[in-house]
């Protein structure tokens, strides 16, 4: 029996409703599945851009840079004299005190000179006696000449008178020499300063016995303290540069105390005076001496110091901290430079000279900012967050180094 029309219409309506419900269910499932993936895509996009790296930077500067060599040296007196007695006697007076400054020719010691003065007077008396005898011989010689002229005596008598006169003259000259020797011996009883300088510790007192003995303990030492010299050695590899610099005129030097209260004081200026004429083959070094003004007596003989000698000056050199330089391989050197978009840019440089914690390089321009701190975490193109780096120059105090670094970094945030 065939179904009626109303029944078929109601069946069709039921099918359409079922299909609509199924489509809604699939759409809901699709929306539910799509929602988590869409939510996860936003963090994925954020993770693709790395965060900026915090780095310390300084500005590349351009300046005249002195090229120097440093060496350890010892302060030595230009002149130093050990005073010893030249006669055997006792000390009568000590006219100098420990540590006193003396002038050349100043009287320092007097010895007991009574015996020497007696010998001098004896020599003078002998001279007076022989001069009187010489005068008598001169008169005899003149009379002999007159008698010979009148033929009263023979020629041999005149010759005898002349010989006696010449012997008397020789005896007088001998006596004069004896007087001079006695005067010299007497002068040994006064000991004067042969140079100007500072006296050390006096080792004798009034009444002490002194002897003319080269091995005896010196009475005192005198050392010249102004000007003063410093002796130091440099490697023979620097000899060519050192000689070339000395040919150009006076070579400046600086003395830098390394111990005591003088540490941190301003360097003392001087000049190189001599380069030794041979290289020590056992150590491969050559000796050099420099002379310094020492009116304030800031340097003392035997003191250990550092000496800096300026060989030449690099004009308008490009200077960066050595800490900014990255070693790549055996010869290649590079630095990270801050690009205009605040990202890291790797630039190859050539190191011309290293000066303490600074380096003179080619390949950079003044005003560029180079990364000093944090470069180990960088790659080319890494976004940067900048701050001023503290770079201490060689020999500079920490406070001044911080100020210099802040000034060099300019407007770095």
Image: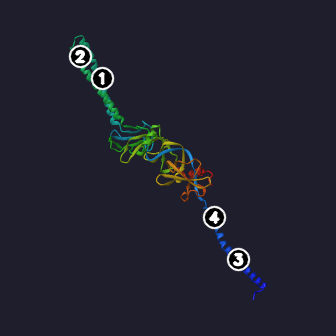
| Quarter of the image with the N terminus in it | bottom right
How far is disc 1 from disc 3 in space, using C-alphas? 163 Å
The residue depicted at 51 percent of the width and 49 percent of the height is: 350
Q: To which quarter of the image does residue 47 belong?
A: bottom right
Query: Picture coordinates of residue 260 (x, y %)?
Result: 48, 51
How far is disc 4 from disc 3 in space, using C-alphas? 35 Å
State left or right for residue 260 relative to residue 122.
right
Query: Picture coordinates of residue 8 (x, y %)?
Result: 76, 84
The outermost residue toward the bottom is 1
Judge the density around disc 2: few (<14), some (14-19), many (≥20) Cα neighbours within 10 Å: many
Q: Earlier in the sequence, mark 1 or mark 3?
A: 3
Q: Which mark is residue 23?
A: 3
Please tell me whether mark 1 sits on a helix, a strand or a loop.
Answer: helix
Query: Picture coordinates of residue 99 (x, y %)?
Result: 44, 44
How far is disc 3 from disc 2 in space, using C-alphas? 172 Å
Q: Earlier in the sequence, mark 2 or mark 1?
A: 1
Judge the density around disc 4: few (<14), some (14-19), many (≥20) Cα neighbours within 10 Å: few
Q: To which quarter of the image does residue 177 belong?
A: top left
How far is disc 4 from disc 2 in space, using C-alphas? 138 Å
Q: Earlier in the sequence, mark 4 or mark 2?
A: 4
Q: Earlier in the sequence, mark 3 or mark 2?
A: 3
- Looking at the rendered image, the disc whose residue lies closer to the viewer, 1 or 3, is 3
Q: Is residue 300 visible?
A: yes
Please tell me whether mark 3 sits on a helix, a strand or a loop.
Answer: helix
Front residue of 11 and 27:
11
- Looking at the rendered image, the disc whose residue lies closer to the viewer, 4 or 3, is 3
Q: Which residue in the structure is indicated by mark 1?
A: 132
Query: Picture coordinates of residue 29 (x, y %)?
Result: 67, 76
| Quarter of the image with the C terminus in it | bottom right
Q: Which residue in the structure is indicated by mark 2?
A: 158
Q: Which residue in the structure is indicated by mark 4?
A: 46
């Amino acid at each position: 029996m065939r179904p009626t029309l109303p029944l078929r219409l109601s069946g069709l309506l039921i099918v359409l409703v079922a299909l609509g419900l199924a489509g809604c269910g699939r759409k809901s499932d699709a929306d539910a599945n799509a929602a988590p993936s869409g939510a996860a895509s936003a963090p994925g996009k954020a993770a693709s851009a790395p965060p900026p790296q915090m780095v310390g930077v300084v500005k590349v500067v351009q300046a005249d840079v002195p090229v120097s060599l440093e060496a350890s040296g010892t302060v030595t007196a230009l002149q130093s004299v050990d005073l010893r007695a030249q006669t055997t006697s006792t000390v009568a007076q000590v006219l100098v005190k420990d540590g006193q400054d003396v002038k050349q020719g100043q009287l320092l010691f007097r010895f007991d000179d009574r015996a020497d003065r007696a010998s001098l007077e004896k020599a003078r008396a002998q001279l007076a006696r022989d001069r009187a005898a010489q005068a008598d011989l001169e008169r005899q010689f003149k009379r002999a000449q007159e008698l010979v002229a009148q033929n009263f005596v023979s020629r041999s008598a005149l010759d005898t008178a002349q010989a006696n006169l010449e012997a008397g003259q020789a005896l007088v000259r001998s006596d004069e020499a004896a007087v001079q020797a006695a005067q010299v011996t007497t002068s040994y009883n006064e000991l004067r300063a042969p140079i100007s300088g500072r006296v050390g510790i006096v080792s004798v007192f009034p009444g002490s016995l002194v002897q003319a003995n080269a091995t005896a303990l010196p009475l005192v030492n005198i050392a010249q303290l102004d000007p003063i010299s410093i002796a130091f050695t440099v490697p023979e590899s620097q000899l060519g540069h050192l000689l070339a610099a000395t040919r150009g005129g006076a070579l400046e030097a600086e003395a830098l105390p390394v111990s005591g209260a003088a540490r941190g004081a301003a360097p003392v200026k001087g000049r190189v005076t001599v380069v030794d004429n041979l290289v020590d083959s056992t150590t491969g070094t050559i000796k050099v001496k420099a002379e310094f003004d020492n009116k304030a007596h800031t340097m003392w003989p035997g003191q250990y110091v550092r000496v800096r000698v300026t060989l030449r000056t690099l004009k308008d050199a490009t200077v960066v901290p050595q800490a900014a330089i990255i070693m790549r391989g055996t010869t290649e050197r590079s630095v990270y430079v801050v690009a205009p978009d605040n990202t890291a840019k790797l630039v190859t440089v050539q190191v011309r000279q290293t000066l303490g914690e600074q380096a003179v390089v080619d390949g950079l321009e003044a005003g560029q900012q180079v990364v000093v701190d944090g470069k180990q975490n960088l790659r080319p193109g890494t976004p940067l967050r900048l701050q001023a780096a503290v770079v201490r120059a060689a020999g500079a105090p920490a406070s001044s180094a911080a100020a210099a670094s802040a000034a060099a970094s300019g407007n770095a945030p």
